Image (cartoon, coloured by chain):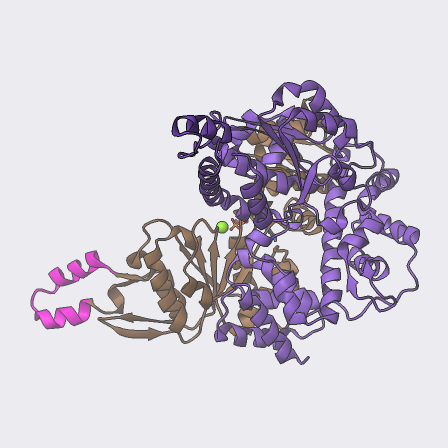
Chain colours: A purple, B brown
Amino acid sequence: MSTAERLTSLVGALRAHGVRIGTGETVDAAQAVEALGFADRELLREGLAATLLHSTAQRPVFDPVFDLYFPRGVGGPDTGPPDRDDLRERLAGALAANDESLLARLAAEAVDGFGGYGNSPSSDGWSSYQTLDRLRPQTLLARVRDDVRGRQGMSGFTDRLLEDEIRRRIEAFRALVATEARRRVAERRDRDRIARRAVAPTTDRVDFLFAGKDRLAELRRTVQPLARKLATRLAARRRRAARGSIDLRRTLRGSLSTGGVPMKPVLRRRRPARPELVLLCDVSGSVSGFSDFTMLLVQALHDQFSKVRVFAFVNRIDEVTRLLRHGAADAEGLSARIRAEATLTGWHGSSDYGVALGEFASLYGDALSPRTTVFVLGDARTNMSDPNLPAVREITERARRVYWLNPEARAQWGTGDSAAYEYAESVEMHECRNVRQLSALVGRLLPI
Amino acid sequence: MLFTSVDDVSARLAETGYLASPAVATTVFLADRLGKPLLVEGPAGVGKTELAKAVAEVADARLVRLQCYEGVDESRALYEWNHAKQLLRISAGRDETWDEARTDIFSEEFLLSRPLLTAIRGDEPKVLLIDETDKADVEVEGLLLEVLSDFQVTVPELGTITASRRPFVVLTSNASRELSEALRRRCLFLHIGFPEEELERRIVRLKVPGLDETLAKSVVRVVGALRAMDLRKVPSVAETIDWARTLLALGADHLDETVVRDSLGVLLKHQDDILKAGAKLDLDAV
Ligand SMILES: Nc1ncnc2c1ncn2[C@@H]1O[C@H](COP(=O)(O)OP(=O)(O)O)[C@@H](O)[C@H]1O
Ligand SMILES: [Mg+2]
């Protein structure tokens, strides 16, 4: 592809994502390329952003598109067969040193070594999920922390910042892996199609698990309109249900006066009380975007139910119904706030579904009755600990219905530490990756 | 042409005490090359205004500043006739005809030039800083657009004044209001966010020379941690510098719970932010 073609395609892809770019800007961009040259890719990136964009909000769309059309490299890095332990070793070093350019190179190497699937050696596709699942950078936290402490000593006030800093570096590395995998895919498939498909889909198709802060804010703005739509849909279902069912016994009894011929069908009367809803939400970092959104949505729908109770957990469970009620007005980082104000963790911060579900069954059993429908929200990744299936069965026995909404793609269920299929044996589990799926499920599954 | 390369921009801005990120240096370089105004957007205290000043210093140019505020208008931004002086002139020369007097009082001598006009008149190099553009009312944007499109201003009584030498233009905005698309399209766009750790450390070291290297590093790490918290207002570079100065003045040679707790008010302006950050940083442990 020539530079001019590359630039034209880049502009085309940006336009397809709703960035308005006129010919004036395209001319400026071409001049920028000429003035900057290709020697430094990051300067080129900034130069094109400066000439083509008009607002900060457009930048998250721009960066991944730029990475596709002006890739860091072509093909895979020139390394031997992958050695997982060796790569983890070097990754730990780079995380400890916070060496950003080394991290970028390692991300490329990782995708090359572990991301390919299908026919090797020239893989059919590249998966960041698979790469990260093999490499498990998050498990390097303790090791990197100890390395850094070993070198600079653990004295001092700032030592308490270290873990979070390393977590942020690991997050950044995961993003690098995602970018690299997208680039490798683009290299083999039609770049333009990928740019449209793989970069920033419309809000209702954004994966909850991969939505960044801005995307989540965008999602939150759709809660109220979506709630109104769903309320209408629930009302319609309620009307149909009321209309549709004939009470056979009472119809026959009524027919005695007409010589046993049922002249007037008697319709079943609507259940007097509205149903009750219980939400059990995993609010740990990985899935908090999903739980935030769903909690807000249910809160917005609360007058559809006689009672809504919301429980949050990471590895301990606590009722947060009240927090949610006044949190809805100021929804940013809802689950972060819930994490701060409710007792959800012992001192380690990772999810433990087994303990949390057990605690719910024993402490909050009174929340369950034959009128309650329970929704469990989470990825069922239980960090290798016991999933506690008896607790789940107890919950299903005491409630009317139990559904599980899992924000992970079905293809990932059961991989690594996911206990999804084990839970799915006792609970109806649905894939719920984005707002589109969620609203379809909520419209269909919510009791009326 | 002010600069020969992006590196040249970085190096020369650094000489004036401004440390530019690659994004800043690249965009300043292009603004100069393409001769376009530069719109700089970003939170308060990240060095937007300072950048314009630094460019002026590097270019050995006069800095002409239009500070925007609610209600700023043409007479403040562009030009105004000096009515008092005109009246004096009229009452002084009683024996001439009205026509003679009128030609005289609507001449350059009685014109009060405001920043936009000042920036396009004369031959000396200038940097025009239109600061906090988002504070001005939307009507002013029309005016800016006119001036920034042709670099000429028409004064009905005098005719059209065209810049013989275009100024380097920097507009800043805190994005409190979205500027019009038309104005944005006239400009190169630059977002300045919070700097990377390494850059911020260099800024602190440069602005607070007495501060120990290790302490500077700790300062920047704490600020980074605060920015990752869900606060009402996170600290900006300006606050980092203030905090570093405070620590220096307090004679602190390292951070501990007491010194951080006692000086957290320099970094955070809201009481509930201070409480929240205090809890997250385990300051109540003492
Ligand atoms: N990159 C930088 N290099 C040097 N000083 C900086 C830089 N960024 C911010 N500062 C300092 O931060 C303070 C705030 O900058 P200012 O330009 O007033 O911010 P803004 O206009 O974005 O609100 C100034 O004292 C400035 O010297
Ligand atoms: Mg300013």
Q: Residue at x 61, y 22 (%)?
A: A369
- Percent position (x, y) of residue A126? 78, 61
Tell me which secondary structure the magenta stretch mostly adopts.
Answer: helix
Number of numbered discs visible in the structure rendering: 0
Q: Position of residue A295 (x, y in %)?
A: 57, 36
| Identity of the residue furthest to the front in this view | A259
Compared with residue A77, is residue B47 higher up or lower down, i.e. above or below? above
Answer whether residue A268 is magenta in the image: no
Taking depth in this image into account, of A14 and B89 the one nearest to the observer is A14
Asked if residue A317 is positioned above or below residue B199 in the image, the reply reads: above
- Residue at coordinates 57% horizontally, 50% vertically from top-left? A436
Q: Is residue B278 visible?
A: no
Q: Nearer the viewer, residue B81 or B74?
A: B74
Left or right side of A117 for A238: left
Report the magenta residues as a range: B81-105
Front residue (pair A105, A250):
A250
- The quarter of the rendered structure image containing the N terminus of chain A is bottom right
Horizontal side, residue A162 vs residue B264: left or right: right
The answer to whether any part of residue A443 appears in the image is: yes
**Residue beneath the point at 50% across and 31% down:** A248
The x and y percentages for residue A380 are 74, 38
Quadrant of residue A105 within the rendered picture: bottom right
